[in-house]
Image: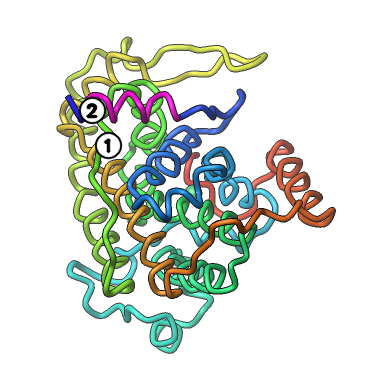
């Protein structure tokens, strides 16, 4: 009963939906950021509560930023299998050591998400220390995006869109089509955020869990593809003025079933981990009391930055690798 009440409370509290047309993946990111707020203890939740909409909406800023800066794309993934075989013990877990071993160019070429999450944790901790509300919110929203991405198996492999196994399109099927079609019925009740004693170890644990699921993600789709009637694999939907080909509902549902709710499980893990990262940054900053500290009006420069981000994203010229095509 308690669970039911909480779940419907969460559903009601999720008020922000991205306006159409949106690229794949926005729904899941916004839902993760939104739900993670409800894992926080009361004192910290009280701080975020008036800003639920901001933290939810801005969950997708990093994806928009990929259209503005080429430096952005590698922050969303790591081609961990580029560096050898599991358990990948040879990859230095610390950024400086990894740079020495592989060079910064190589790391950027194959993705830096684990190290970038750590960097965002430093930033968020500093923002809490400074009691800089604007920066806390901005960094919290951004961190949510990268933590969300790190939970996606296809963000942790070179074969990120099935391009090496003749499964192109699987990236969007997994991280967008499934959550958008079935996500309303997922259970997002994850319990309470917990302090993370070793941030670096936690980040790598997430990456390794994601990577360990890559084989299932690919093999189960290949199996389904072989068995499923070809003429029922896709359907057509209108998006704004255009009609796009999408994986059919039947195909999507069957794939989700074969994976035994993997997408739901990874979303739930992302939610609880993200809440725990936010909580950890606040605790490491000395649990500052943020009552009564208000958000400053965004400066003209900050507003222009947000507007420019939207513009370059709407123009749709991608800088760097696009995971989705
Ligand atoms: Zn992303």
| Mark 1 or mark 2, whichever is nearer to me | 1
Helix, strand or loop status at disc 2: helix
* Crowd tier of the residue under label 2, counting other residues whose Cα lies within 10 Å: few below 14, some 14–19, many 20 or above: many
Q: Which residue matches tag 1?
A: 263
Main SS of the magenta part reads helix
Q: Quadrant of residue 31?
A: top left
Q: Which residues are magenta?
A: 4-13
Asked if residue 84 is among those painted magenta in the image, a careful observer would answer: no
Q: Earlier in the sequence, mark 1 or mark 2?
A: 2
The residue at the point 62 percent across, 65 percent down is: 132
Residue closest to the far right: 300
Q: Quadrant of residue 1?
A: top left
Q: Are marks 1 and 2 in contact (CB under 8 Å)?
A: yes
Per the model, the C-alpha gap separating discs 1 and 2 is: 7 Å
Is residue 108 shown left or right of residue 208? right
The residue at the point 56 percent across, 38 percent down is: 53
How many marks can you see?
2
Q: Nearer the viewer, residue 204 or 285?
A: 285
Helix, strand or loop status at disc 1: helix
In the rendering, at what x and y percent does residue 122 appear? Answer: 48, 74
Q: Which residue matches tag 2?
A: 256
Q: Nearer the viewer, residue 185 or 20?
A: 185
The residue at the point 46 percent across, 29 percent down is: 14
Asked if residue 12 is among those painted magenta in the image, a careful observer would answer: yes
Q: Is mark 1 within 8 Å of ligand 1?
A: no
In the rendering, at what x and y percent does residue 314 appear? Answer: 71, 36
**Residue 169: mark in rendering:** none
In the rendering, at what x and y percent does residue 246 appear? Answer: 44, 20
Is residue 301 shown left or right of residue 27? right
Residue closest to the far front: 292
* Crowd tier of the residue under label 1, counting other residues whose Cα lies within 10 Å: few below 14, some 14–19, many 20 or above: many
Q: Is mark 2 within 8 Å of ligand 1?
A: no
């Amino acid at each position: 009963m308690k669970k039911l009440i909480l779940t419907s409370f969460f559903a009601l509290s999720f008020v922000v939906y991205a306006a159409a047309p949106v690229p794949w993946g926005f729904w899941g990111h916004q839902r993760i950021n939104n739900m993670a707020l409800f894992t926080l203890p009361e004192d910290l939740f009280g701080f975020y509560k008036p800003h639920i909409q901001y933290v939810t909406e801005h969950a997708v800023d990093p994806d928009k930023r990929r259209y503005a800066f080429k430096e952005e794309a590698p922050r969303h993934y790591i081609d961990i299998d580029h560096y050898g075989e599991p358990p990948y013990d040879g990859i230095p877990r610390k950024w400086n050591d990894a740079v020495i071993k592989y060079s910064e160019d190589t790391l950027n070429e194959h993705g830096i998400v684990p190290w970038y999450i750590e960097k965002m944790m430093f930033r968020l901790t500093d923002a809490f220390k400074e009691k800089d509300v604007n920066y806390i919110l901005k960094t919290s929203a951004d961190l949510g995006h990268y933590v969300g991405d790190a939970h996606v198996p296809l963000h942790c492999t070179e074969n990120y869109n099935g391009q090496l196994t003749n499964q192109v399109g699987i990236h969007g099927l997994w991280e967008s089509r499934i959550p958008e079609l079935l996500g309303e019925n997922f259970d997002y009740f994850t319990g309470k955020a917990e302090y993370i004693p070793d941030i670096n170890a936690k980040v790598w644990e997430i990456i390794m869990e994601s990577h360990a699921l890559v084989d299932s993600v690919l093999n189960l789709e290949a199996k389904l593809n072989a068995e499923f009637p070809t003429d029922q694999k896709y359907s057509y939907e209108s998006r704004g003025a255009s009609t796009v080909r999408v994986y059919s509902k039947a195909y999507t549902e069957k794939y989700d079933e074969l994976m035994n709710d993997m997408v739901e499980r990874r979303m739930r893990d992302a939610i609880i981990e993200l809440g725990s990262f936010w909580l950890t940054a606040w605790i490491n900053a000395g649990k500052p009391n943020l009552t009564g500290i208000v958000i400053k009006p965004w400066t003209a420069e900050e507003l222009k930055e947000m507007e420019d981000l939207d513009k370059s994203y709407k123009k749709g010229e991608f800088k760097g690798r696009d995971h989705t095509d």
